[in-house]
Image: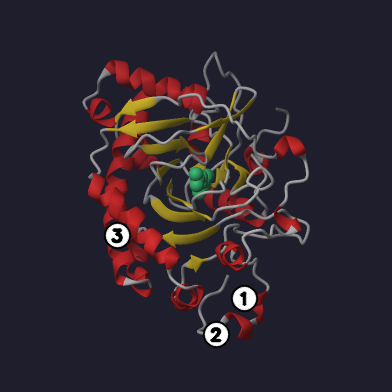
Amino acid sequence: MENNGNDIPSENPEIVAFVENVQEMVRKDPSCIPERYIIKNHDDRPKIAPVALDVPVVDLSLLSEGNEEELKRLDLACTDWGFFQVINHGVAQEVLQRMKNTISSFFELPFEEKYKYAVMSPNVYGQAQSFVVTEEQKLDWADALLLKTDASYLEKLEYWPPGLKDAIETYSGEVNAVAKRLLCAISLTMGMDKESLQDMHKDALESLRVNYYPTCCMPHLVLGASPHSDVSSITILTQDDDITGLQIRHGEGWVSVKPIPNALVVNIGDVIEIWSNGKYKSIEHRAVTNKYKPRISVASFIMPSLDVELEPLDHMVDPLNPLKMYKKIKYEDYVMAFLKKKLEGKAHTKIAKVESL
Ligand code: OGA
Ligand code: NI
């Protein structure tokens, strides 16, 4: 969406073509679920009673001390699950809470007011999907706020309400510190020097996606976020403490990630899957909705600089993984290919896969 003008939606044909704001749709008629949101294939619909297994939990303070046992736990989490929850991460509870409260208050504003901010800002509000490619494409039951938060973009947050700008700045600074410590630990578990992954990112990028999942009267028919893997190197997610919505592919099916209060949920993204030649998994995940309470999550995507050339690291091509699973690709090309397609599980990773595999 181009948000550069000050036009209100009805005067701007580009914006009228947008997918509807789900929160508004539910506010106007909570019983209405348009066809475009209903998942046709029954197997792809959320289960009424999803599997709840505990995803691994790692303690960041132990990781940062170089605790061998904890590093082993992290290695297994990245290999077997691609997801883990992080405790003792050092981000103050107040910072997390303030971020969640501020986001809630923002989404509670009247639509017209949110839209006023959105049209002024170069960042994006309102659209859950990056690209809606076809009329038939199923839509996600969610709205989102997409913000670039690396240094050169922080000033652009001035277009948003001051409270939101402050909360995001503080939160994103703290999350960046966690990301750096996690990348040190993952460098070690990948058999490298502590600073290696950070160096490989060159000037790391960060963008933030605030997801707002309105309630849905028939949550088993829709998805809040379609299955996908993240194009990041790692993603750090804060979510409501009392609402379960995130599900990850594990074993034969989907497993719900039950929130641990104040923990951060971290997943390995495609970049580390490629660097590790598939040893560390960028796992498909999705979000489901519920009848009772809207859910908020904030995903911070840590990414390498766009000019970084991705390919499996030589030392990760070992007797266990003797073939390179991925070919060399510039990160920018990888991201652009992802953005042009609709979310479809891991289909976008094909562009980097070695054909014969
Ligand atoms: C994402 C994502 C999951 C969630 O934003 O990429 O996977 O629980 N979000 O909101
Ligand atoms: Ni994701």
In depth, the one of 170 and 53 nearer the eye is 53
In this picture, is 58 found above or below 308? above
In this picture, is 320 found above or below 144? above
Q: Residues within 10 Å of mark 3 (few under 14, many from 20)?
A: some
- Residue visible at 30% across and 49% down in the picture: 96
The outermost residue toward the top is 319
Contact, mark 1 vs mark 2 (Cβ under 8 Å): yes
In depth, the one of 41 and 209 nearer the eye is 41
Mark 3 falls on what kind of element?
A: helix
Mark 2 falls on what kind of element?
A: loop
The residue carrying mark 2 is 7
- Residue visible at 38% across and 59% down in the picture: 103
In depth, the one of 225 and 38 nearer the eye is 38
Tell whether 203 sits left or right of 88. Answer: right
Among the two numbered marks 1 and 3 on one chain, the one whose residue lies closer to the N terminus: 1
Quadrant placement of the C terminus: top right
The residue carrying mark 3 is 167
Q: Amino acid at mark 2?
A: Asp
Among the two numbered marks 3 and 2 on one chain, the one whose residue lies closer to the N terminus: 2
Tell whether 81 sits left or right of 26. Answer: left
The residue carrying mark 1 is 15
- Residue visible at 49% across and 53% down in the picture: 294
Percent of width and height locating residue 123: 46, 68
Among the two numbered marks 1 and 2 on one chain, the one whose residue lies closer to the N terminus: 2
In this picture, is 50 found above or below 286? above
Quadrant placement of the N terminus: bottom right
Q: Give the CA separation, mark 3 to mark 2.
A: 28 Å
Q: Amino acid at mark 1?
A: Ile
Percent of width and height locating residue 313: 48, 30
